[in-house]
Amino acid sequence: MGYYTNKVIWITGASSGIGEALALALAAQGARLVLSSRRADELARVQKACTNPNNVKIVTVDLLDTVVLGAKTSEALAVFGHIDIMVHNGGISQRGLVAETSMQVQRKVMEVDYFSYVELTNHLLPHFMQRGGGHFVVISSVMGKIGTPMRSAYAAAKHALHGFFDCLRAEVFNKNILVTVITPGYIRTNVTMNALKGDGTPVAELGHNIANGLPAGKAAVQILKAVAAGKFEAYVGKNSTEKLALLVNRIAPNLLQKIVRKQVPK
Ligand SMILES: NC(=O)c1ccc[n+]([C@@H]2O[C@H](COP(=O)([O-])OP(=O)(O)OC[C@H]3O[C@@H](n4cnc5c(N)ncnc54)[C@H](OP(=O)(O)O)[C@@H]3O)[C@@H](O)[C@H]2O)c1
């Protein structure tokens, strides 16, 4: 029996990329899954591809629709009667200079990538408390630890996740509730296709770094290993430059600033 066997796991952003890869890997390890995102047809495709699709159920949710997130949590809880692990993964990225990024985009990225995670956590936490345990898994980003040009909204939302979930981890540490924050580097998914430009339109291109990123299936293996080990935080990726950037930011932040400012488009 592995860490995930028979566990009930709710994954947001399960219709694509990292969430989809996590669903496939977890289903193969005998977990029971609740898959969420906006697109029911894509979730059904993932469900069909899972080992034992009968153990995989769908609850559609738009993370921007804050009014329904309480009801969606109840719906997800009702599927198998409880939840052991919540994987906060659904999200959008952003590409644009601060000077060119509308407030609408700044707020939208914060709503989807930060506030929806806080809201779902608030709704699920009483259940974890009552059961005497649970595990929150949060897909942040290397951008949750450093800030580079063209990513202000995204980096802000991801940094906020670290603040919130570090506090929560300390508050619930003695209640058998774990919090693992994952900071992926470049992973090959649709993330840049869906990333918002300053005017709110999607980038609609894959981008060189993402195209050469770690395949999502391999990222899922690394994520699940870190979660099963109960890590507080873990980098996931294949790029030694990303790891180096995290280290330089810790020990010589001024040097990192000198390096990242070269990335401002001419
Ligand atoms: N790929 C990378 O290099 C990378 C690096 C660091 C962190 N991450 C993080 O990894 C997570 C997953 O991204 P990905 O790379 O797998 O990208 P992706 O392939 O674009 O997947 C994003 C997922 O989020 C869902 N989503 C987006 N907006 C939503 C909304 N308003 N309501 C509900 N679901 C929504 C999408 O589903 P629907 O469209 O069906 O709603 C989709 O399932 C994100 O949090 C991202 O920031 C990715």
Image: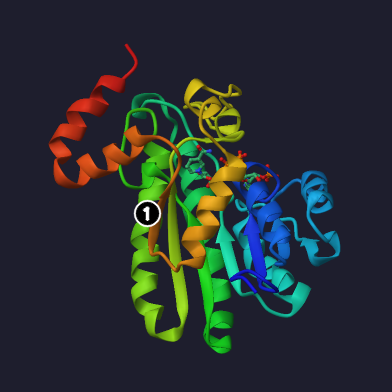
- How many tags in the picture? 1
Q: Residue at x 44, y 69 (%)?
A: 230
Residue 183: percent from left, percent from top: 42, 49
- Mark 1 residue type: Ala
Rendered location of residue 258, percent (x, y): 18, 27
Nearer the observer, 110 or 130: 130
For the residue pair 7 and 103, the one nearer the viewer reads as 7
* 22 horizontally vs 111: left or right: right
> Which residue is the site of mark 1?
160
The residue at the far front in this view is 1
75, above or below 185, in the image = below
Residue 23, quarter of the rendered image? bottom right
Instruction: Answer few, some or many: residues within 10 Å of disc 1's Cα (few below 14, many 20 plus, some between 14 and 19).
Output: some
Image position of 47 (left or right of 249)? right
Residue 118 visible, this angle: no
Relative height, residue 50 to residue 99 (above, below): below
Q: Quadrant of residue 181?
A: bottom left
Which residue is found at the position 58% from the left and 66% from the top?
Answer: 86
Residue 198, position as x, y percentages in the image: 47, 27
Q: Position of residue 9 (x, y in %)?
A: 65, 67
Up the image or down, 37 lies above or below 7; here it is above
Residue ID at (65%, 74%) = 1
At x 59%, y 81%, the residue is 127
Q: Nearer the viewer, residue 188 or 203?
A: 188
Q: Quadrant of ligand 1?
A: top right
